[in-house]
Amino acid sequence: MYQSTRHINLSVPQSWSRCSLPELRAIASVLKDRASAADRYHPFDMRDVKIAAFFLLAGIEIVEPLNPRVPVEEQYYTVRLRPYTLDQWDSRRFWCRLLRLRDRIVRFFGRDDTFSLYLWQVSSWLFPPAQPGKQKEPGLLDWLDQTQGEALLIFPLRQIRRRRHRIGRSITFSGPAPLMDGFTWQRYRWAQDYIENCRNLENHYIQLVAQGSKVSLADIQKARSHADMARALFLATLFERRITYVNPDTGRTETDFHYQSNQHTDNSPWFRHFPDEDWQIVTLWWESTMHYLARTYPKVFKTQSVKPGRKRTNPMELYTRTTSTLEKYLGLSAQQIDREPYTTVLQQLENISREAEEMERIRNRNKRK
């Protein structure tokens, strides 16, 4: 009796930019779960993240996990293919539940759709071993923890609906354009300050939670509320709301998604308790954009070590210095600089830094003579 061979085609995205929004949310959910499960004896490991993300992205459901009582080379997962994709589950959840129910009924009458996926197979795809004399081949999901390659430069959450309270009307917000096109220097600077403040407050909250019973529950809840408020201010700076404004180019009154300078305070109540998975996606997009800007303007984003015993420069003090330099260099007022596109200001700062370094080299060369 001959047994037919079953051909299974498994595919996963090849970069951050090629992931759909449901796929990004799935990866963010895995990162969150692995980070929350990490402790002193089980540290966070990207290998576990890649394995869990592989099953989600490839559309595989684990029926039976590995059997640790057999040798590693004989360990395998008993799995089956998911009857729908992550995109279908996000947009047509009711029909996906019907598909799942249909498959359960079919399996009840004796059809076995499971197959074995050996651990060595998954490892060879995700963590290929180095071959002697050959360059090491990248794994299928190596792009998850690499800064090179196609970064996430297009904001995934193009439009979202938010409610200020659980009961009440929802408002549609529009996300920023690719590479924050249209951001003024003021808006970019505020976003930088808010994300920095958010990180500090979130780290403070994590430190309080780690102390356990040494800290009161009221202090922990207060720190969590402050971190959530900082997150809301940052998001309210990024997202635009549909408002009525006067177009400065045409002088006509228009109603559309538009930025206003006070939206970070006016719109922040709508971004309280933002979903953690979506927040992970936003921070991933922000870091990808910052990496791109750092490559485009290397002098501006050049990091300098802080000497022991010296405090880091206050953001407001740094902004004041930068504004004073630009006023002298460009002949513009502080208000005019705030309204300039942020890329124009970054390019001017890059030119100033390059000219200053060139003058320093010439000065040092003349001293040696």
Image: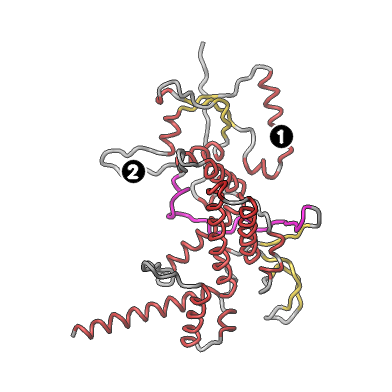
The 10 Å Cα crowd at callout 1, few under 14, some 14 to 19, many 20 or more, is some
Report the span colored magenta: 142-166
Q: Quadrant of residue 88?
A: top right
State the residue lying farthest toward the top: 1
Residue in the picture at 72% in, 57% down:
162
Query: Residue 337, position in %: x, y?
Result: 55, 81
Residue 146 highlighted magenta (yes or no): yes
Three-letter amino acid code at disc 2?
Lys
Residue in the picture at 49% in, 27% down:
117
User: What residue does disc 2 label?
Assistant: 136
> In the rendered view, would you say 58 is above or below 326?
above
User: Is the magenta region chiefly helix, strand or loop?
Assistant: loop
| Numbered-mark total | 2
User: What residue does disc 1 label?
Assistant: 97
Residue 320 highlighted magenta (yes or no): no
Residue in the picture at 65% in, 53% down:
218
Query: Residue 158, position in %: x, y?
Result: 65, 58
State the residue lying farthest toward the left: 369
Q: In which quarter of the image is the C terminus?
A: bottom left
**Alpha carbon distance from label 2 to label 1:** 42 Å
* Left or right of 307, for residue 230: right
> In the rendered view, would you say 9 is above or below 43?
above
Instruction: Indicate the secondary structure of the residue bearing disc 1.
Output: helix
Q: Are marks 2 and 1 in contact (CB under 8 Å)?
A: no
Query: Residue 328, position in %: x, y?
Result: 47, 88
